[in-house]
Amino acid sequence: MAVTTLDAPAEAKTLSLRLSPGLRSASPVLVLLVLGFLAPLVTVAAYAFATPKSFDVFRTFTLANFAAIVDPANTVWTSFAWSLLFAFITVALLAIVAYPIAYGLNRVFGRFSGLVSVLFVFPLFVSENVRLYGWVLFFIKNGVLDGAMKWLGLGAGPEVLYTPGIILFGMAYVYLPFMLFPMTLGIAMIPRDLVDAARDLGASRLMIWREVELPLAMPGILIGMLLTFVLAAGAIAEAKILGGQSVIMIAQDIEVAFTYAQNWPLGSALALILVAIVSGLALFVLSRLDLDRILGRR
């Protein structure tokens, strides 16, 4: 017994020596990720294989929830299609809108860059729902836009609420900062010496942008696109507040399954499929990124 008591601390010390300093330093973060991310995800995955409309998590295993989703009579796949379509369109729109702004923050605005950045960050301090209801008050009949146009004698304002177009507008408005700032970081990584050298060698402005600036800024641009897509794929407030149920997003189907329907296994199965789709696309994009260069390791 005495030998065992003496060997236990020695074994613990040996195990501690085997762990790298980085792993020991990261252990609190790893514990937090396991408890805050991995554990809920495992619970959702377990519910996805539970008996439908029950709470028999970890006690039953069935594929009935997934069978119900792929049933041709089930229209839930239209929600998946709408969510992914809107996410892709939002990414495309914001890539076009955010690039000139990001370029201006780095090369044009000069000392006013900080002020412009604050203007884009400030809306994040206000609840997303409050901002979206503000747009409802702006576009609604007899609201700000409609009332102003009638006062100016221009007739009634356009009826844009509760349409797919206004949902896209709301998503672009909400997720613009998440595209803008990674893109700004990507453009900031472009060495000015390379641009000046290309100009001295006779390259046109378009050629410099295509051959020098765009490839060097691409890591930041891809990160902005990835972040925006992940957030937009799970959007729900824009469709409910601005769209008025004109388009049903997959996040809304998941919410209904967990609340009104009280079918947690079905909601978990939908969430698991959404996570798999978004994670697969995210991993594909990350496989194309040189993270060492982005983090400045080389």
Image: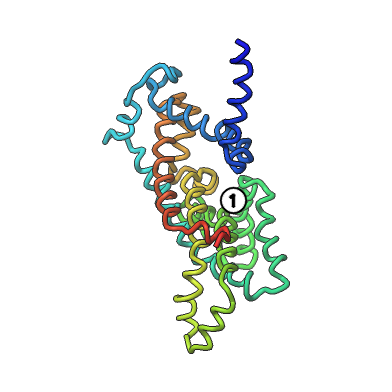
Say what amino acid the circle numbered 1 marks: Val
Q: Is residue 246 left or right of residue 27?
A: left
- Disc 1 marks which residue? 136
Coloration mode? rainbow
How many labels were placed on the picture?
A: 1
Residue sitting at 59 percent across and 63 percent down?
185
Residue in front for this viewpoint, 189 or 145: 189
Residue sitting at 47 percent across and 57 percent down?
90
**Which corner quadrant holds the C terminus?**
bottom right
Compared with 51, 249 (above or below) is below
Tell me residue 181's x, y (percent). 60, 60
Residue in front for this viewpoint, 98 or 7: 7
Tell me residue 43's x, y (percent). 48, 27
Tell me residue 297's x, y (percent). 56, 59
Q: Residue placed farthest to the left in the image?
A: 72
Q: Is residue 202 visible?
A: yes
Pointer 1 local density, CA inside 10 Å: few below 14, some 14–19, many at least 20: many
Residue sitting at 43 percent across and 26 percent down?
46
Compared with 237, 208 (above or below) is below
Tell me residue 42's x, y (percent). 47, 29
Quarter of the figure with residue 105: bottom right
Compared with 73, 60 (above or below) is above
Residue sitting at 54 percent across and 35 percent down?
37
Considering the numbered disc 1 on the image, is that residue within a helix, a strand or a loop? helix
Compared with 59, 142 (above or below) is below
**Which corner quadrant holds the N terminus?**
top right
Quarter of the figure with residue 55: top left
